[in-house]
C-alpha cells in the first residue's frame, strides 16, 4: 500500500505542476527532503498527512488507496481522429485504466511472474520503411501467422507478448491504444470499428509494444491519411502493419494470376480474403512497387470496399475478451469481488454484467 501511495503522491504533484519544494510547503513539511523521502518510498505518510494531501491535491482518498485504478503508471498511446477532444480522451483513458488495473489486481498472487525477457524489434526512428517491412515479414514467419495473418495475429500477441487485448466500446474518433505497463502491456481496440480497421489497428499497436523502449510513441497520434505524411514513428508503424497483414508471399501469386481482371474487382476480392481494407491493400501494392503513382488516378476509392468483407458479414467482437471475463467470473465466484463493485468497475448494470457472462457462455456467478 505504501508503494501505491508514494507513486500516486508524485503523480498528483507532477499533474498539478508542483515542485517538491512547493508541495512540501503546502503539506507543512519542514523541508523538501521529507517529501523526497516519501516519494522514494523511504518514509511513510501518517494518516493525518495523507488526509492533508487529499485536501491539498484536490483528490479523493481512493486516489491513493484504490488498487483498481492506474495512477502514476501505465503509458498510453492513443490512435484517434482529429475530432477526438482532449477531455473525451482523458475521461476514456481513466476508464481504460480501470479495466486494465482490474485485470491486474484480480490476478495478483495467481499469475505467473512476467518474463523479464521481452520480445523486441531491433528498429529505431532511424530505420527505413523497408527495414520496418522486413521486420514485419520476419515476425510473421517467426509467429507462424500463415497466409491470412489477420486470423492469427491477436492470438500470437497474447501468447508471445503476454499482452492483454481488449475490445471495448470507445467514443467515436478513438480507434484504439497501446498501453505500456510493467508486467502487463495491453492493446485496446474499438470493437465498433469495421473489421479491416480493427485488424490494422491491432497490427499498428503491436508495433508500438514491440518498439516502445527505443521509440516511445506520442500520447496521442492522429491517424495518417493513406498516402499522407505523418510522424516518423507512425509511418514506420503503418508500414509494419501493412506488411504484417498483407505479406508479399501471399499477395504475389494472386497478383500474378489476376490476368485482365478489373483492378477494383481484384482489390475488393483480395482485401475480403485477407480481412483488410481495399484502400490499405492499394497502398500496400504501391509499397511493393506493383502499382505506380501513374496508376493511382485510375483507381477510385469510392469503388473499393472500405473494410474487407461486406458489413453484414462482419461479426462485432464480444466486449472485452475471454481471459478478462473469465478472470472477473473467477473473482466473483470465489468472493474476491462483490457484484456491485464489479458492475461499478465496468460502469455497467448488474443485468448487463450477467449478459456479459452469458455472451461468453459462462454461468452467471450471482443471483439477479
Image (tube, rainbow, N blue to C red):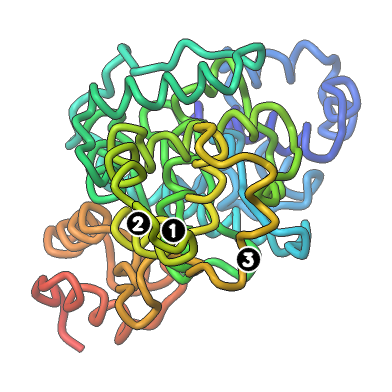
Task: Measuring from the top left, give residue 276's x and y in whole percent.
Answer: 41, 56
Q: Does residue 313 sit above or below 55 in this rendering?
A: below
Classify mark 1: helix, strand or loop: helix
Is disc 3 surrounded by few (<14), some (14 to 19) or many (20+) residues within 10 Å? few
Rendered image: mark on residue 144: none
Q: At 34% across and 43% down in the image, what residue appears?
A: 164
The picture places residue 260, in percent across and down from the top left corner, at 39, 57
Residue 24 pos. (x, y %): 83, 25
Evaluate whether residue 345 shows in this view: no
Counting other residues with Cα less than 10 Å from the Cα at mark 2, is it few (<14), some (14-19), or many (20 or more)?
Answer: many
Q: Is residue 320 left or right of residue 31?
A: left
Q: Quadrant of residue 332?
A: bottom left
Residue 22 sits above or below residue 281 on the image: above
Is 62 in front, or is 242?
242
Give the class, few, some or many, for how many residues have Cα within 10 Å of label 1's Cα (few <14, many ≥20): many
Q: Pick whichever, 100 or 301, lies toward us.
A: 301
Label pair 1/2, CB-CB below 8 angstroms: yes
Q: What residue sits right under mark 2 in the picture?
A: 270
Q: Secondary structure at mark 3?
A: loop
Q: CA distance from mark 1 to mark 2?
A: 5 Å
N-terminal label among 2 and 3: 2
The residue labelled by disc 3 is: 300
Please determine whether, in this image, residue 97 is positioned above or below residue 114. below
Q: Report the quarter where the N terminus lies.
A: top left
Residue that appears at 83% across and 15% down: 32
Q: Which mark is residue 267?
A: 1
In front here: 228 or 11? 228
Callout 2 touching callout 3 (CB < 8 Å)? no
Cα distance, mark 2 to mark 3? 16 Å
Amino acid at each position: 500500500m505504501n508503494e501505491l501511495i508514494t507513486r500516486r503522491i508524485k503523480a498528483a504533484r507532477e499533474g498539478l505542476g508542483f515542485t517538491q519544494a512547493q508541495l512540501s510547503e503546502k503539506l507543512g513539511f519542514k523541508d523538501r527532503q521529507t517529501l523526497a523521502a516519501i516519494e522514494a518510498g523511504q518514509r511513510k505518510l501518517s494518516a493525518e498527512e495523507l488526509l492533508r494531501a487529499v485536501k491539498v491535491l484536490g483528490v479523493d482518498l481512493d486516489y491513493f488507496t484504490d488498487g483498481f485504478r492506474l495512477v502514476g503508471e501505465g503509458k498510453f498511446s492513443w490512435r484517434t481522429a482529429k475530432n477526438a477532444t482532449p477531455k473525451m480522451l482523458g475521461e476514456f483513458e481513466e476508464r481504460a485504466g480501470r479495466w486494465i488495473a482490474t485485470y491486474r489486481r484480480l490476478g495478483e498472487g495467481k499469475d505467473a511472474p512476467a518474463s523479464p525477457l521481452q520480445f523486441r524489434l531491433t528498429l529505431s526512428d532511424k530505420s527505413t520503411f523497408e527495414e520496418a517491412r522486413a521486420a514485419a515479414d520476419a515476425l510473421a514467419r517467426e509467429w507462424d501467422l500463415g497466409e491470412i495473418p489477420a486470423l492469427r495475429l491477436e492470438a500470437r500477441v497474447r501468447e508471445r507478448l503476454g499482452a492483454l487485448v481488449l475490445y471495448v466500446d470507445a467514443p467515436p474518433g478513438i480507434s484504439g491504444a497501446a498501453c505500456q505497463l510493467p508486467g502487463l502491456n495491453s492493446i485496446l481496440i474499438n470493437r465498433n470499428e469495421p473489421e479491416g480497421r480493427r485488424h490494422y489497428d491491432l497490427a499498428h499497436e503491436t508495433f508500438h509494444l514491440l518498439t516502445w523502449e527505443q521509440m516511445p510513441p506520442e500520447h496521442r497520434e492522429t491517424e495518417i491519411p493513406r498516402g499522407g505524411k505523418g510522424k516518423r514513428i507512425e509511418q514506420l508503424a503503418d508500414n509494419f502493419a501493412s506488411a504484417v497483414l498483407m505479406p508479399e508471399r501471399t499477395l504475389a501469386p494472386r497478383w500474378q494470376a489476376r490476368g485482365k481482371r478489373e483492378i477494383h474487382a481484384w482489390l475488393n476480392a483480395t482485401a475480403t480474403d485477407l480481412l483488410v481494407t481495399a484502400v490499405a491493400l492499394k497502398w500496400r501494392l504501391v509499397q511493393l512497387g506493383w502499382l505506380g503513382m501513374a496508376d493511382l488516378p485510375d483507381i477510385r476509392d469510392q469503388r473499393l470496399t472500405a473494410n474487407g468483407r461486406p458489413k453484414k458479414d462482419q461479426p462485432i467482437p464480444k466486449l472485452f475478451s475471454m481471459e478478462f471475463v473469465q478472470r472477473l467470473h473467477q473473482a466473483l465466484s470465489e468472493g474476491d469481488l462483490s457484484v456491485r463493485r464489479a458492475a461499478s468497475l465496468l460502469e455497467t448494470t448488474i443485468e448487463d454484467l450477467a449478459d456479459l457472462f452469458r455472451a461468453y457462455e459462462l454461468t452467471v456467478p450471482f443471483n439477479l
